[in-house]
Amino acid sequence: MSGKAQMTSTTRAIETLLHILNDVDVSTRQRIEACEGLLAYEAPLEAVIQARDFLVAVFEDGDGQTLPDRMDALKLARRFESPKIALPTIHTKKQETDRREAWRKFEIAERELKIVVATKDVPPPGWDDDLRAGSYVPPAEGWPAEPPDIPLKALVQARRTRADRMQQERLASPDASPQEKEAIRASISRRKGNGKDD
């Protein structure tokens, strides 16, 4: 395929992906996949901004989107934030390893904070897989700030939500005995009555 034909094919693919991204009748999952395609094609800046804005909107929509879609949008949005370019060769291997781990720690803490605050729940399984993977690439330059701390109130709320969810799952389980279910119902009732955990 000639360079001109290949460019025309790529342009057509980007246009198609943008059409899918902007079609409100298409499912959120397919629109997220269109964003990923735009990233793969190294689309023009304007298209990249559209895709990133859509991904951020999906993640921040706690009422209208599913948690898996919100998590995928958050992970993908990070890849739109900055281009991955070769690091200067002046860094020693140890310096770059330390810098990479510092960024990894910072981004894990930052994402956990965003999830806890946005969902009022603990992060779901796999929420940081891409950040802990061996293929993780930090921003091209600089060092991060200190990792953010999750506010105590938000952390307590998230753990309470998780405990409530686990109790509800146990209530629905056929393995739970009548006595165990009664104890769970009593615990829930007490908590609702005084607004505190046991």
Image: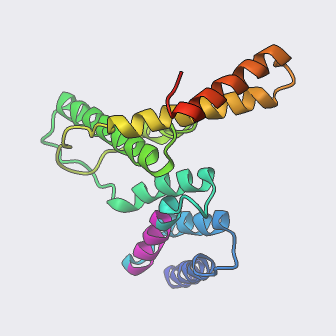
Decide whether the magenta segment is chiefly helix, strand or loop.
helix
Quarter of the image where one finds residue 165: top right
Q: Does the magenta stretch include residue 90?
A: no
Given residues 196 and 26, the one toward you in this image is: 196
Q: Where in the figure is residue 37, as x and y percent of width and height?
A: 56, 66
- The vertical placement of 72 against 169, above or below, is below
Q: Can residue 133 be seen in this view?
A: no
Name the image quarter holding the N terminus.
bottom right
Residue at image coords 42%, 39%: 131
Quarter of the image where one finds residue 77: bottom left
Q: Does the magenta stretch include residue 55?
A: yes
Q: Which residue lies furthest to the front in this view?
A: 193
| Start-end of magenta stretch | 46-56
Residue at image coords 29%, 39%: 106
Residue at image coords 82%, 27%: 173
Q: Where in the figure is residue 25, as x and y percent of width and height?
A: 70, 79
Q: Is residue 88 left or right of residue 168?
A: left
Judging from the image, the colouring scheme is: rainbow
- The vertical placement of 158 against 70, above or below, is above
- The vertical placement of 14 against 150, above or below, is below
